[in-house]
Structure formats: structure tokens, C-alpha cells
Image (spheres, rainbow, N blue to C red):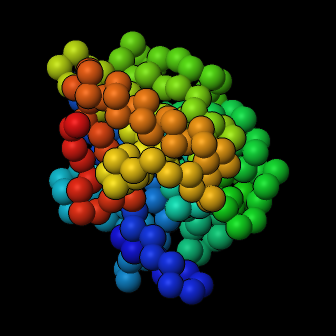
Amino acid sequence: MKERGSGSLLVEIQPFLVITDRDILLLDTGLGFRNADGILQLHQNLIDNGINPMEVTKVLMSHLHKDHAGGVSMEDIMTGERSLSFPHATYYVSRKELDYAIENDGKSYLAEEVNLLPKRDNVVLTEGNGTIDGYIHYEHSGGHCPYHQVFLIDDGEDKVFFGGDEAPQISMMRSRFIAKYDYDGKKTMELRQQYMERGKAEGWTFLFYHDTKLPTTKF
């Protein structure tokens, strides 16, 4: 999916679906666009690939910038009321990131998209580092934005790493540079190198949210 904003900025995004023997996992939720029929494009993409959106069991959020969290919730066209886009899933969201997003409503965050999260029983607010169901590991990383988190899914056979905007494209992994759009550019640069080294040593498959040409790879 591509979005043109002011100037010549082009954003390419791709939420990921990871299916294990225990879960159907969605990693970040895209921009929240609807198609010509009024259906959430993310739902349509899942349906087109044989997945019922209501069968997604977990939604893992790296952070809540609008290009990653636009599909967290959706507005009813008739009533204007919002509901979670995946009502049967458990959402995993950093508690501090959620607070920060609501407090900083504006350019990068849209509070209206995430205001529902603290009000729903199927939302787990994470703190620091931890493990979900014994095989999904999350780490507070805090490079791209203060409360960014990353995920490593290890089901005993495969290790899949999702670094959100701290490992967004393969070109960024291979280059040492400090990006001005990161909250802590130096830390983010260092994290990219750490993730690549760990991934090489442990055989991770990387998922790149902003790389449509090479969305997955191993180093």
C-alpha cells in the first residue's frame, strides 16, 4: 500500500500475518484505509488470502504512529462509532506508548484511532521486556519513538523477528546512518546492527514493514 503526502513523500507499508500452530498473529495494522466498497483494506487483503479477519488471535503493535496503527480501530460508516478492527483478537500494546500517543495527538499519532484501547478487556498493556504464551518475546527498544517495542516469535522451529520502524528496510540494516526522523537516531542505528548480528547468529527471519521489494530475509 502506498500513500503520498505533502511534497514527494512516498510511504510503502505492509502489515504481516504470521501463522503458528497456536495463533494467527497480525503485526501492526497499517493505515486504516478502506476500499471502494467501504471495507477495511486490511480485512480485504486477509480475505483475499483465505483468512477470516475475525480469526486473528493476537495483534502485536510495535508502536502507534498512524501508518502502523491506522487499522487498530475502525469507524462505523453509519453511526460514526469506533470499534476494534479485530474484536476477537488480543491486542498487545506498550502501556507507555499508548499514553504517549494520546498525549501527543497530532502529526504522527491520531488519538482517535487508539482511544479505545485502554477501554477494552482484550487489550494487554505491556511494560518493558516480556514473553507472551511462552514463545512470543517483546523488548522495549525506544529508538524510533520513546516507547517502541520489537517482537521475536520463536515456536521452536522458526524464529521470526519484527522490528517495526527500527528495522524497516533491508537497505537501512546494511547502512550505518543516523536518521533525523528517529527519536534517538544514534540508538536506532546501533539497534539495527545489534538485531542484524543477533539474527545472523540465531537464524532469524526478518520482516520489513516498509520494504515491499524485499519484505522478508535472513542474513
* Residue 205 seen in render: yes
Image quadrant containing the C terminus: top left
Left or right placement of residue 199 versus residue 182 in this view = left
Image position, residue 114 (x, y; %):
66, 52
Residue at 49%, 26% (x, y): give it.
Answer: 138
Residue furthest right in the image = 103
Front-lying residue, 41 or 119: 41
Residue furthest front in the image = 176
Image position, residue 159 (x, y; %):
26, 26
Vertical position of residue 115 compared to residue 39: above or below: above
Displayed quadrant of residue 194: top left
Residue at 76%, 42% (x, y): give it.
Answer: 99
Vertical position of residue 168 compared to residue 200: above or below: below
Image quadrant containing the N terminus: bottom left
* Residue 56 seen in render: no
Left or right placement of residue 105 versus residue 24 in this view = right
Residue at 41%, 16% (x, y): give it.
Answer: 133
Image position, residue 191 (x, y; %):
50, 35
Front-lying residue, 209 or 90: 209
Residue furthest bottom in the image = 7
Front-lying residue, 189 or 20: 189
Residue at 55%, 42% (x, y): give it.
Answer: 188
